[in-house]
Amino acid sequence: MKRWFGSMVAAAGYMLAGGSALAQDEAGFQAYLMQLRTQAIAKGVTVRTLDSVLPTLTLNTRVIELDRAQPGGNPNAGIPDFAPYKAQHVGAAIIARGRSAYQSQRGRLQRIEDQTGVPESVMVAIWGHETSYGVVMGGFDLPRALASLAYEGRRRQLFADEFIAAMQMVDRGVPVSQLKGSWAGATGGPQFLPSVYLRLARDGDGDGRADIWTSPADTLASIGNYFSNAGWRAGQPWGLAVTVPAGFDRSGIINRLISPRCERVFARHSGWKTIAEWRALGITPQTRLWPDDRVQATLLEPDGPGKTAYLLTGNYRVILDYNCSNFYALSVGLLADAVEH
């Protein structure tokens, strides 16, 4: 505690002596850590953990720059075609690595699918899409990044809560040295935020720890648990590529619902119809057999009329729960299909 206050005082002294903007920011950051400390203690974080972590933290201006550079969601911005994204994220190299990972983990994957109902290939596809099967997990110091983003203030409560969750992970026995990840706080093979780790990370290899950083079994079990928790329906595909007939009348399939979240993502989908109804409208599958006629699906044409379209079930919405982007969810589904064949 004394060392922490000492660092704050030193930073404040530097601000007075040098008068630089950077020194002012650092002093402000160190003062803000006092607030975070109080909030964390109120949430049950131990003083021991806070005294071991807080004195090591300095302001990371890089993560603030990255956060401010995020797209602003301009509703008038054009949506690019899906095809270039698909070529990058569902290419031959990532499919080949996915098939290798799929085969090497089959025993574990089968157990997880039996427990959760989530297909083995979908778990592998998420792992591949998020971290290239555990190879690229990010090198940012999570406590420092999250505290810096909370201090910046644009999304203060979000990042403050995630910082506190990271401290709770340390209290649970996760080494601070393991808390590395993306600039925005995602960590491990599944790229879970700390709060998600606390809720949904699972031990897949029976050693008593949910080690999503070095254990593929734990990573895959945690992804399966996430999807099960989000409502994955066993035995139902995520969707299928289809051909829409020329001259198709789209006026009768307009989606008149407004989603409470990710409005622009869901606005691109048609209204819901059963597979039987889509068949009657002349939609034909390209790559797989039709699911049960009673399954509900929406139509998405990511590259516009005349190009490959997709009928998407409720399980596609579960992938969107992981990352609310049509391009992301489509590429996960397509990678999953490719990995298991």
Image (cartoon, rainbow, N blue to C red):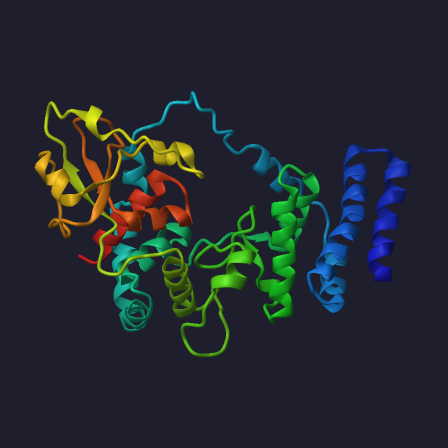
Q: Can residue 93 be seen in the rendering of this structure?
A: no
* Relative vertical location of residue 13 with respect to residue 189 in this rendering, above or below: above
Give x and y (percent) for residue 32.
Answer: 77, 47
Left or right, 26 with reference to 277: right
Left or right, 164 with reference to 187: right
Q: Quadrant of the N terminus?
A: bottom right
Name the residue: 76% across, 66% down.
47
Near-viewer residue (106 or 202): 202
Q: Quadrant of the C terminus?
A: bottom left
Give x and y (percent) for residue 168.
Answer: 63, 64
Which residue is the extreme one toward the top? 76
Near-viewer residue (257 or 233): 257
* Relative vertical location of residue 70 with respect to residue 27 in this rendering, above or below: above
Name the residue: 61% across, 68% down.
175
Give x and y (percent) for residue 327.
Answer: 33, 39
Give x and y (percent) for residue 228.
Answer: 36, 61
Name the residue: 63% across, 52% down.
161
